[in-house]
Image: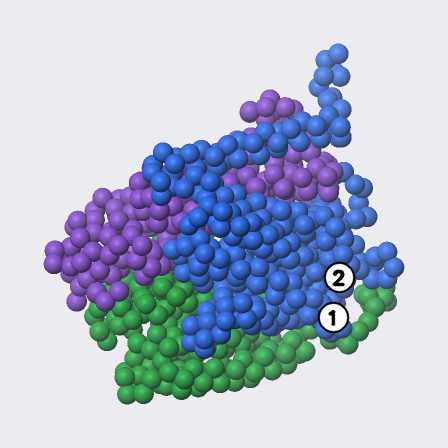
């Protein structure tokens, strides 16, 4: 298709992907899912009873794949069998996905905390009532954004995969990315804010999450507030880059025009990877110089 | 762990295999007469999901080292490949049975490879992967016939695979098998609570499969109603079990005091 | 009853390609630095996702790229290159943002606890590890290792996808072959490739058992076991996939 229209669609997809990434991470922050959840799960065992929403739905990639697939199933059925207009169908599909995700969240927190009865962890129903709608709202955003990305890829950029399959695939990818990037901000920073800044979590502090916050007891929405300042948007940038850059290299150098063009697009992707590699090395160098080592080199001192 | 009586593994195996096959075959033979009868496939899928969830519970309690979702994804992956292979042979009524057997064989091969080559030390690994692959295959067959209306290969591919609904079956069915153990993880896990949750999640999958069905509005309406009914009944049971098992279910409250913790 | 032998015989080359693809996927999982849950608490080096899901995420990005490119240009080198690059770009974008969060949000530098000197930059590692942790962040050696992993994983997934598409577009005697753009064919090939990818990601994860930092990690030496396991497991899977895809043209009406 015309390069100009492709670039416009691409920009829209990139924006939708950024929103999807941010809302995916924030949803896992308010509900403490996957990685950082291991500490929330450990806390009652170490005697630290908490009021954090212990939602554990099999890890973010699978959970996000599920909500995106269910949303897109609902949308596709409405478009094909009931003749709804696409935008309306995408919204209703996302609503269905949010409701299913809400049901999974509620059963997850109740199940996890019921299985910790011997550690005297109570189930706080007000927590469930206040956090679940927030979780469902973010699930709605994530699902809708991923549906938009997939719908445009299939019907505008003419990607051959089925719409529902593409939503599943992007759901897995956004879950992996959210788990790798945004969860670090929650797990290493907000969840252990009482530890000194500038170090990793000492294994001896496992389970000692922050339970008493700035004013009152810490809960998932407090964690969400903090992570929405950095972790969430960064995850959005990451997923947006994956979707945008991955598709951009094919639009700039269209493989349909010949093998040489196809290889140019692959090389462009390789250049992007190398640029990020150099950036990573640069950050590694500057943080080592600026932050300095934790220990002195005893071997050199003894030799001196 | 619990003083409640546990349902023995072989009972659940029989329940899953017999329930699943009976459901799929009833749907297969009755649907040409009236497409609404595909709902039997959904019931078969629920039986298979409950069976699979219990197998996941037993194998994961040994410590897989890599997380529970992986075995669910493994099971459904094998299930998809085996079902599509079995249906592609166009053997007519023998198709579902061949698909189930092929899935179990592939599951056994992967299990044996995991034990002999990779060196996993879980005692029930081969039996577990075989059973989970079989449960996955029955899930896909059951929900697939609900959506497609028949198990004829061309129809199945066009209505279930090309639309992408097979991924919905994959993930919603897979979650019905692996979510119960993952969400009830803890020292006070009880089997009946876990199985109730599995049935409830399978109910959600049935609602979605019914919604996507092309077997006519009758099938759509009946299957969705059955799915909502299953979901409602088992959510109620699950909540009752949660209240039974939890330390305390409170409306609101502060953290327990020192005296309460002692 | 479909003629199974008639379907397998002309496609032996593609079955072998699928088996090689599965083995490559299995090997690639060992290169990708996985920190798991501890990495999200800055307690372990690597990316903070589980082994299976990170490898699957990278491979999936590769398969999406391969699907898009194969629709436009069927040259094998272009398709495989696109798959490899797709996987690498996904990992690169994930890792650079993770490094931003580690450096600016948590305040730690990328460092490995498994080696004293980074094999590539020759930076000293052990002095910069926080107390009580097993390293944190993504040092350069882990980044390079991840790129190699993405390359191999994308290649493996792309190879399986390409092979199955070729099986589907084969001209059997007396049967109209399907086209590359046939949506039914693409859907079933993509579904198979995804399922195949998941299975070949789970098997090496059973081998790794938890976290791995890349090719400099002592656990990396275990890769032959997973490679053999995936090779053996891919044989029945490859045959089943080829029969099911090949039967599509024979069934007709699509």
Between A194 and B208, the residue placed more toward the observer is B208
Image quadrant containing the N terminus of chain B: bottom right
Colour in which chain A is shown?
Answer: blue
Disc 2: which residue: A221
Give the image quarter of residue B184: bottom right
The answer for how far apart the CA atoms under marks 1 and 2 are is 9 Å
Asked if disc 1 and disc 2 are in contact, CB closer than 8 Å, the reply is yes
The circle drawn on residue C140 is none
Q: Depth check: C208 or C92 in front?
A: C92
- In the picture, measured across the screen, residue A36 lies left or right of residue B150, that is right
Chain identifier matching the purple colour in the rendered picture: C
Image colour for chain B is green
Closer-to-camera residue (A190/A112): A190
Q: Position of residue B16 (x, y in %)?
A: 40, 75
Q: How is the image coloured?
A: by chain
Q: Is residue C47 left or right of residue A134?
A: left
Q: Residue at x 67, y 39 (%)?
A: C100
Q: Position of residue B92 (x, y in %)?
A: 22, 73
Residue to which mark 1 is pinned: A130
Q: Is residue B25 visible?
A: no
B3 displayed left or right of C171: right
Asked if A168 appears above or below B95 in the picture, the reply is above
* In-image side of A159 versus A225 (left or right): left
Position of residue B120 measured from the top left corner of the image (x, y, whole percent): 44, 50
The C terminus of chain B, quarter of image: bottom right
Q: Is residue A271 above or below residue B176?
A: above
Which of disc 2 and disc 1 is earlier in sequence? 1
């Amino acid at each position: 298709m015309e390069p100009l229209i492709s670039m416009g669609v691409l920009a829209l997809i990139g924006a939708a992907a950024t929103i999807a990434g941010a809302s995916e991470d924030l949803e896992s922050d308010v509900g403490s899912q996957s990685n950082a959840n291991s500490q929330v799960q450990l806390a009652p065992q170490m005697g630290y009873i908490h009021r954090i929403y212990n939602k554990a739905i099999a890890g973010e990639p699978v959970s996000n794949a599920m909500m995106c697939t269910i949303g897109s199933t609902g949308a596709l059925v409405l478009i094909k069998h009931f003749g709804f207009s696409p935008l309306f169908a995408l919204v209703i599909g996302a609503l269905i996905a949010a409701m299913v995700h809400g049901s999974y969240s509620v059963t997850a927190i109740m199940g996890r905390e019921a299985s910790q009865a011997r550690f005297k962890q109570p189930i706080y129903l007000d927590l469930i009532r206040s956090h679940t709608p927030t979780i469902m709202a973010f699930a709605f955003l994530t699902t809708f954004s991923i549906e938009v990305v997939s719908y445009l890829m299939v019907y505008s950029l003419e990607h051959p995969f089925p719409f529902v399959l593409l939503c599943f695939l992007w759901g897995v990818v956004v879950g992996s990315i959210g788990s790798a990037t945004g969860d670090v901000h929650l797990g290493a920073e907000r969840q252990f804010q009482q530890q000194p800044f500038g170090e990793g979590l000492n294994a001896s502090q496992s389970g000692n999450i922050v339970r008493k916050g700035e004013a009152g007891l810490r809960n998932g929405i407090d964690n969400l507030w903090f992570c929405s300042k950095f972790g969430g948007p960064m995850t959005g940038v990451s997923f947006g880059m994956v979707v945008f850059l991955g598709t951009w290299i094919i639009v700039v150098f269209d493989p349909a025009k010949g093998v040489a063009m196809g290889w140019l697009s692959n090389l462009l992707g390789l250049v992007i990877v190398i640029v990020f590699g150099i950036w990573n090395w640069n950050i590694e160098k500057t943080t080592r110089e600026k932050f300095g080592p934790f220990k002195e080199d005893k071997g050199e001192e003894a030799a001196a | 762990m619990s003083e409640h009586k546990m349902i023995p593994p072989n009972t659940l195996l029989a329940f899953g295999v017999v329930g699943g096959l009976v459901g799929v075959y009833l749907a297969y033979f009755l649907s040409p007469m009236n497409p609404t009868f595909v709902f039997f496939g959904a019931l078969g899928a629920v039986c298979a999901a409950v069976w699979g969830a219990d197998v996941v519970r037993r194998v994961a309690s040994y410590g897989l080292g890599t997380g529970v979702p992986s075995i669910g994804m493994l099971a459904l992956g094998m299930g998809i490949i085996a079902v599509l292979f079995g249906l592609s042979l166009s053997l007519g009524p023998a198709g579902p049975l061949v698909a189930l057997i092929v899935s179990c064989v592939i599951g056994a091969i992967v299990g044996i490879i995991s034990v002999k080559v990779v060196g996993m030390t879980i005692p029930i690994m081969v039996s577990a992967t075989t059973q989970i692959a079989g449960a996955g295959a029955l899930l896909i067959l059951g929900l697939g016939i609900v959506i497609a209306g028949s198990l004829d290969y061309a129809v199945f591919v066009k209505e279930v695979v090309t639309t992408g609904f097979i991924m919905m079956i994959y993930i919603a069915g897979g979650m019905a098998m692996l979510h119960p153990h993952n969400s009830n993880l803890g020292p006070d896990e009880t089997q009946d609570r876990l199985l109730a949750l599995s049935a409830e999640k399978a109910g959600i999958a049935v609602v979605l499969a019914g919604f996507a069905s092309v077997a006519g509005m009758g099938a759509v309406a009946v299957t969705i109603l059955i799915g909502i009914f299953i979901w409602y009944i088992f959510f109620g049971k699950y909540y009752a079990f949660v209240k039974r098992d939890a330390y305390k279910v409170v409306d609101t409250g502060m953290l327990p005091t020192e005296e309460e913790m002692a | 009853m479909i003629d199974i032998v008639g379907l397998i015989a002309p496609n032996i080359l593609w079955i072998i390609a699928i088996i090689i693809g599965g083995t490559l996927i299995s090997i690639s999982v060992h290169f990708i630095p996985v920190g798991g849950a501890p990495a999200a608490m800055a307690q372990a080096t690597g990316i903070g996702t589980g082994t299976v899901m990170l490898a699957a995420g990278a491979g999936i990005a590769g398969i999406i790229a391969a699907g898009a490119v194969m629709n436009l240009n069927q040259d094998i080198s272009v398709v495989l290159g696109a798959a490899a690059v797709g996987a690498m770009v996904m990992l690169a974008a994930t890792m650079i943002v993770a490094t931003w969060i580690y450096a600016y949000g948590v305040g730690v530098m990328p460092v490995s606890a498994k080696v004293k000197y980074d094999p590539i930059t020759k930076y000293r590692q052990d002095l910069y590890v926080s107390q009580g942790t097993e390293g944190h962040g993504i040092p350069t050696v882990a980044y390079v290792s991840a790129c190699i992993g993405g390359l191999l994983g994308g290649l493996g997934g792309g190879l399986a996808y390409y092979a199955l598409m070729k099986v589907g577009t084969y001209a059997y005697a007396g049967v109209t072959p399907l086209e590359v753009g046939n949506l039914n064919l693409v859907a079933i090939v993509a579904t198979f490739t995804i399922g195949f990818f998941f299975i070949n990601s789970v098997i090496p994860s059973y081998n790794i058992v938890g976290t791995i930092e890349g090719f400099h990690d002592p656990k990396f030496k275990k890769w032959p076991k997973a490679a053999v396991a995936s090779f053996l497991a891919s044989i029945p899977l490859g045959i089943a996939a080829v029969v099911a895809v090949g039967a599509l043209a024979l069934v007709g009406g699509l």
